[in-house]
Image (tube, grey):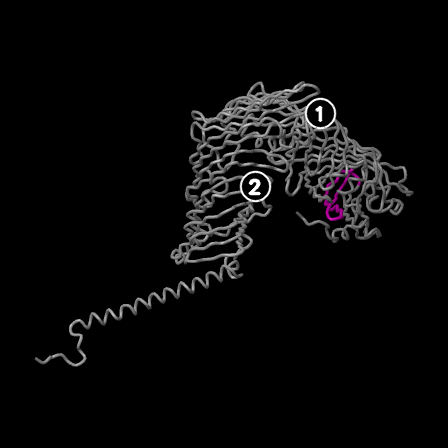
Amino acid sequence: MRSTDKPGSDMGPAAGPRRRRARLPRLLRGVLGAALGVIAFYLIAGNVLLNTAFGPELVNRKPEKFTLAWSGGVTWWPGFVTLWNVQANGHVRRVVWSAQAARARGRIALLPLLSRELRVVWIEAGEVTGSADRSADDMLPPPSHADGWTLRFERIATDSLRQARIGAFDIQTEGSAEFAFLKQLRGGPMQVMPSHVLLRDTRIRSQDNEWLSAGTIEASLAIDRHRREDAAGLAKLGLADLVLRIGADLPALAVDLDDEGKWRGRIDPAGTRGRLEATLSMRHGVLDQGGMLEARFPLAATHADVHIDEEARVLLAIEGDGMHLTAHLPPPPEGRGLIDADLRFSGRKIPFPADPKALLARVGGHLDLEWHFGSLDWLGPLLVRVPWLTLKGSGGMAAQLRIADGRIAEGSHVVIPAVDVVAQVAAHRFHGQARADARLSGDRVRLGLVVERFEAAAEAAPDKTLVRGSDLRIDLESSADLHQLRESLRGHLRFANAEVPDLRAVNDYLPQRALSLLGGSTRLGGDLRIDAEGRVSTGRVDLAVKGARARFAAIELSGDLDLDARIGGTDVKTRHFDLDNTTLRLRNVRVVDDGHTAGERWWANLRLARGRIDGFKPLVVDARTEIEMENVGLLLALFARHRDYPGWALRMVDAGTLRASGKMRVQDEVLVFDRVEASNDRFSVKARLRVVDAKPSGDLLLSWRALGLGLELERGEHKFHLLGAKQWYAERPELLPTP
């Protein structure tokens, strides 16, 4: 029987499947080859990238914020990386940090990169050390933007955390940690996912002192997802769940009473160890009931041949619906000293960001204290919001504070026998040693500082004494509400009969080429009211000078003066002072020369109807003045010597009391009087005067009904105008702009 199959079709019906099976291995081989090619390319490119300069250049695009360096690396599969000798550095706001690891390996998910997400599935690091320091530079975050990359680190872990440095404190430990967080760059949300740290055999040192040893510290932390504008800085802790457990040894403390009666504290490395125990948990800023923190410090005290061993204790207990804080420091031998506190805070919520005012409004209890402090610098910030008043140096303090519902209660008082005081008021610095006494009076707290001897100097030249005196009093008054203490504080600074050792020191404030003081015997007094911002709200300064000598332009004057400066208000930043109703009384004024005025003496009273002064040196003064003078002789002397005037003119005007008004400006070594107008029953005077580089220029008009005499002064050279004097004066330009 003959076959009907066509030539070449010997495979029959099964030929098609066999042909497809033949093609399939070739397709698999192609796909496999392509995959192997991609992997090979990745291995070559990835390892080249990790072991050449290209890798760090790609990562460190913003070195001012973050840098990452390593000595070598390897990748055996896409997304898996191992690095050796890793060094990371960063700057976040005011914190500069660094971290080092002998080895780090991890896995990066590659597909999320296509959607602008860096997802690190896990990182494991070995032999980890790190540091964190406060920076003077604030690295501000960039403006918010919706398309910022998302960083998701799902697990960063180490079981060999060895060492860390935070500021001045060095931490050595055997620790493990797991940390996870999410952050969208360019102002997007951030979240700390449940993280945990366990530190064993922990020691904390600072310089040569060991503050904690044999410590076990365990903490867990999680922070809800939020944006920067919702919670910044410490406010993030208000969104946190936190668990903290601590068990550690504390150092023994020792104090010795020196020959000056001051207690000197030190750590006693050979003493019995104290103990720190803490079990605290917090949910969204609210402490859980049953938590506690207790610190016990063995305290050895020695004075002469007397030695005692006591224990200082601090205990914070979270109980009921509040917090209970007790602290006790026993008195030293043969010395007076005690710290005993028993304070209760209603509520278990901790204010974040840290706001002491919110806690102070919830406190009650008592604080008894009697101790000599090595430094009292911490007292000033407790009293004043703006640091115009500071207490410095070492000193003793005896205090009994009774507190109820956040208010200082009856029976409270504070005494500081001696403390160095610095008060910066109205651009001047007062300093001396004071005695302080504070008591409750009604619903107000009053603190009195009495400085037996004091000195004052300009802030710009604190080493150059301007004023020296005794019995300076600074009285402070504020609300009894602890949380309103600083905001409601008002001050009152008073002194009298102080002396200015060298009156020439005042010339720093004056346009010296126009006006300078040469000498005289002075008495100075002040009475200033100061608000919570450190500004002088009202006050007065009285200056009396006997036998004053001064140079005005090219002439020298002598006499007595009494200045009653009324200060209506100040601006601390611009140092502007209102001087409305300030008066200056001149007596026995004479021109020191050999002219016709020799032996003649005048008086004059000046009042600043409206005045403003800029406290920067040299002074800038703008004022509208009212003047009363014995006669016009003193004014004439400012323009020319009396012997240069026509005799008939002097006989007409050199008699009779005058009242005058005008404007005055002192600025940039220039003294200007303008629109000065005076008159009495016999005559009238108009004048304007400008003094630059000790050379006066200006115009003077003397009038007797229809008659007039003009005097033109140009840099010390004068010229009289007899005909048309009134018209001549009217055409002369004014020196100050019309307000």
State how far apart marks 1 and 2 are (Cα).
34 Å
Name the residue located 77 percent from the left edge and 47 percent from the top edge.
689
Does 226 sit left or right of 257 as displayed? left
Identify the mark nearer the N-term, 1 or 2. 2
For the residue marked with disc 2, what is the amino acid?
Ile
Q: Residue furthest right?
A: 594
Residue 664 position in % (x across, y down): 73, 44
- Image: magenta residue range: 658-682
For the residue marked with disc 1, what is the amino acid?
Asp
Q: For the residue labelled by badge 1, is the local secondary structure a helix, a strand or a loop?
A: loop
**Residue occupied by mark 1:** 258
- 25 or 221, which is in the foreground? 25
Q: Residue furthest left?
A: 1
**Residue occupied by mark 2:** 166
Residue 585 position in % (x across, y down): 77, 34
The reply to whether residue 440 is visible in this rendering is: no
Taking the magenta stretch, the answer to whether it contains residue 619 is no
The reply to whether residue 291 is visible in this rendering is: yes
Q: For the residue labelled by badge 2, is the local secondary structure a helix, a strand or a loop?
A: strand
Question: What is the chief secondary structure element of the magenta stretch?
Answer: strand
> For the residue carrying disc 1, how many other residues have a C-alpha within 10 Å: few (<14), some (14-19), or many (20+)?
few
